[in-house]
Image (tube, helix red, strand yellow):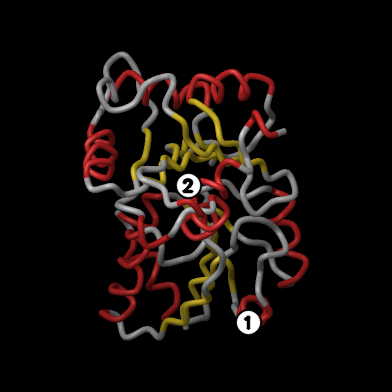
């Protein structure tokens, strides 16, 4: 048996169903490259399950998925994922490979940044277009394809959820102070420093922050912040109810 278990957005999001699966599993693996998982959360899981989770890498999931999945032939394996297990497309590879090997799969869903951020923003989920991800850039690596997604969404009068790329080695996303200049540089003609968006940090956690401000204001506000993860929701045409919802998080209203 192979269990694919979502960890949600913070410790405490683990469901009763997930806890039962962890206790039944012979061994537990977890990936931390799609989003961060704190060591405290891993320790809680170890205490709950009575066994120590082992970290695996993107290579284990994508390039060596056959070997990873085959472990569930002789014993029950649980693989833990930040958020919801099936939101990240690559995780469908695991299910396909398990089916090819005749291994049963049980999926335990959990809260995801995709639904939580959109819901907390106050914007209508049915008016969102495809999600964009701001990458970590360097002198030799400056991809700009993400801005095409944003531009198309705005042209279609759709809101955009903008995620920040995650560094696999550390399991944390790039900072706001790095993401916003990348967005402004790539998005000339589409966004500017005066473009207003919903800045969302540590969604689903006690330290959750939601701010509706210009990109320039966001960059300034983020300088003294100790947030662990963040994203931006860029509104397009908003209804009266949507405007009222996002403006309740405006810096001018606090």
Which image quadrant for residue 139?
top left
Residue annotated with mark 1: 17
Residue at x-position 36% and y-position 40%: 133
206 relative to 140, above or below: below
Badge 2 local density, few (<14 within 10 Å), some, or many (20+)?
Answer: many
Residue at x-position 37% and y-position 21%: 192
Residue at x-position 50% and y-position 40%: 231
Image quadrant containing the C terminus: top right
In terms of depth relative to the viewer, which is nearer, 61 or 176? Answer: 176
Residue 33 drawn at (x, y percent): 47, 47
131 relative to 143, above or below: below
Badge 1 local density, few (<14 within 10 Å), some, or many (20+)?
Answer: few
Could you tell whether 239 is left or right of 170 in the image?
left
Residue at x-position 27% and y-position 33%: 147
Which image quadrant for residue 227?
top right
95 relative to 180, above or below: below
Could you tell whether 119 is left or right of 73 in the image?
right
Residue 118 drawn at (x, y percent): 49, 54
Distance from label 1 to label 2 (Cα)? 24 Å
Residue annotated with mark 2: 33
């Amino acid at each position: 048996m192979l269990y694919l278990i979502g960890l949600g957005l913070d410790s405490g999001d683990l469901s009763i169903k997930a806890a039962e699966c962890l206790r039944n599993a012979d061994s537990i693996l977890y990936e931390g490259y799609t989003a961060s998982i704190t060591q405290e959360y891993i320790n809680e899981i170890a205490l709950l399950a009575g066994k120590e989770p082992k970290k695996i890498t993107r290579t284990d999931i994508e390039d060596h998925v056959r070997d990873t999945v085959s472990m569930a032939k002789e014993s029950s394996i649980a693989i833990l994922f930040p958020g919801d297990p099936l939101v990240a497309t690559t995780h469908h590879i695991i299910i396909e490979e398990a089916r090819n090997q005749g291994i049963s799969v049980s999926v335990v869903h959990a809260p995801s940044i995709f639904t939580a951020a959109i819901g907390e923003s106050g914007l209508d989920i049915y008016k969102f277009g495809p999600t964009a991800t701001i990458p970590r850039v360097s002198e030799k690596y400056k991809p700009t394809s993400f801005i095409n997604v944003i531009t198309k969404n705005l042209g279609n009068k759709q809101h955009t959820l903008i995620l920040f790329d995650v560094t696999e080695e550390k399991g944390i996303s790039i900072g706001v102070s790095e993401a916003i200049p990348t967005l402004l540089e790539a998005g000339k003609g589409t966004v500017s420093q005066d473009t207003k968006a919903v800045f969302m940090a540590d969604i689903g956690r006690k330290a959750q922050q939601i701010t509706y401000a210009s990109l320039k204001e966001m960059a300034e506000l983020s300088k003294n912040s100790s947030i662990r993860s963040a994203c931006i929701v860029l509104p397009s045409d908003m209804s009266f109810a949507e405007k009222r919802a996002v403006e309740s998080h405006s810096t001018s209203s606090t």
